[in-house]
Image (tube, rainbow, N blue to C red):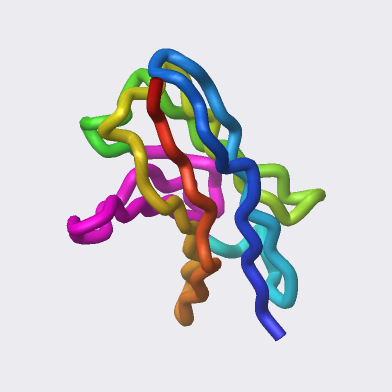
Amino acid sequence: QVQLVESGGGVVQPGGSLRLSCAASGITFSAYHMTWYRQAPGKEREWVAIITNTASTNYADSVKGRFTISRDNAKNTVYLQMNSLKPEDTALYSCKAKRISEWWGKGTQVTVSS
């Protein structure tokens, strides 16, 4: 059974930092491309960052220079380090594992507010 479980969300002030984690089980994690998405209330889900199975990374323009995606294949976990957070980063953040099939986690809420 494949599971992706996100954690690390919370409430943070503008300018603050959070590190999200997504722990995977039931898949050969190292073979999968891992992606973070987010969805704000009333908005469509948007892609945030990707790390491939060869550790290449790419970011949405809105987070470039502030967010860093990384992975630890020994721990079957992908991370999203978020710095210099802004109120517009408030959203439900979810991770996706994709190779041929794809699986999604349920998400972790990030709220940036003073």
**Identity of the residue furthest to the right in this view:** 74
Q: Eyeballing the image, is 91 above or below 60?
A: below
Depth check, front residue: 69 or 30: 69
Frontmost residue, 45 versus 91: 91
Across and down, in percent, residue 55 comes to 54, 42
| 35 in the magenta segment | yes
Q: Residue at x 53, y 21 (%)?
A: 17
Relative to 5, residue 38 above or below: above
Q: Give the vertical position of 53 relative to 100 (above or below).
A: above
Measured along the vertical axis of the image, is residue 13 above or below residue 87?
Answer: above
Query: What segment is highlighted magenta in the picture?
Result: 33-58
The residue at 71%/86% (across/down) is: 1
Percent of width and height locating residue 100:
46, 79
Camera-nearest residue between 69 and 105: 105
- From the viewer's perspective, is 105 left or right of 48? right
Residue at image x 22%, y 31%? 61
In percent of width and height, residue 88 lies at 26, 33
> How many numbered discs sit on the rendered protein?
0
Residue 8, horizontal then vertical, whole percent: 63, 42
Residue 57 counted in the magenta span: yes
